[in-house]
Image (cartoon, helix red, strand yellow):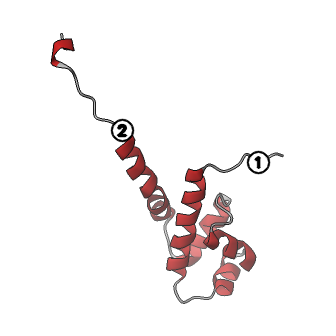
Amino acid sequence: MVRLPLTPAEVERGQRLGALLRRARGCRSMLDVALASRISPETLRKIESGRVATPAFPTIAAIADTLGLSLDAVWAEISQAERTVEDQSVLPVTRHPSLVL
């Protein structure tokens, strides 16, 4: 199976996810969180560093559960910047007075 290259938005979202997980992990060791999540420490390291920008849903669900994060909160955090950019890129609709019938 050929994987398409990630878009810049996907890469950025992966970096935000990694930063969120690092903050949520706090002082817990990477090994402790990985083993509790039933994933390899290397996988967690790659996700936290942004090298795996689109990890599998069950993997993120397991890590979020271990860290006490809701999936809704994770999604809200990592997609917030995208919504901000999208909101700014939409130009307001203005009508020219002479064109309004």
Q: Circle 1 is placed at which residue position? A: 3
Along the horizontal axis of the image, is 79 left or right of 33? left
Which one is nearer the viewer's eye here, 2 or 61?
2
Quadrant placement of the C terminus: top left
Q: Position of residue 77 (x, y in %)?
A: 45, 63
Q: Residues within 10 Å of mark 1 (few under 14, many from 20)?
A: few
Q: Quadrant of residue 35?
A: bottom right
Task: Determine the residue located farthest toward the left in the rendered image.
Answer: 97
Residue lying farthest top?
A: 101
Q: CA distance from mark 1 to mark 2?
A: 31 Å
Looking at the image, residue 6 lies above or below residue 28: above
On residue 90, the disc is 2
Question: Crowding near pointer 2: few (<14 within 10 Å), some, many (20+)?
Answer: few
| Residue 31 placement (x, y as % from top left) | 69, 85
Under mark 1, the amino acid is Arg
Residue 32 in the image: x percent, y percent?
Answer: 66, 86
Is residue 43 in view?
Answer: yes
Residue 78: x %, y % from top left? 49, 60
96 or 36, which lies in front? 96
Q: Relative to 59, does residue 22 appear above or below in the rendering?
A: below
Q: Is residue 61 above or below residue 35?
A: above
Q: Assess whether mark 2 and mark 1 are in contact (beta carbons under 8 angstroms).
A: no
Secondary-structure class at tag 2: loop
Q: Secondary structure at mark 1?
A: loop
Residue at (55, 59) in percent of width and height: 12
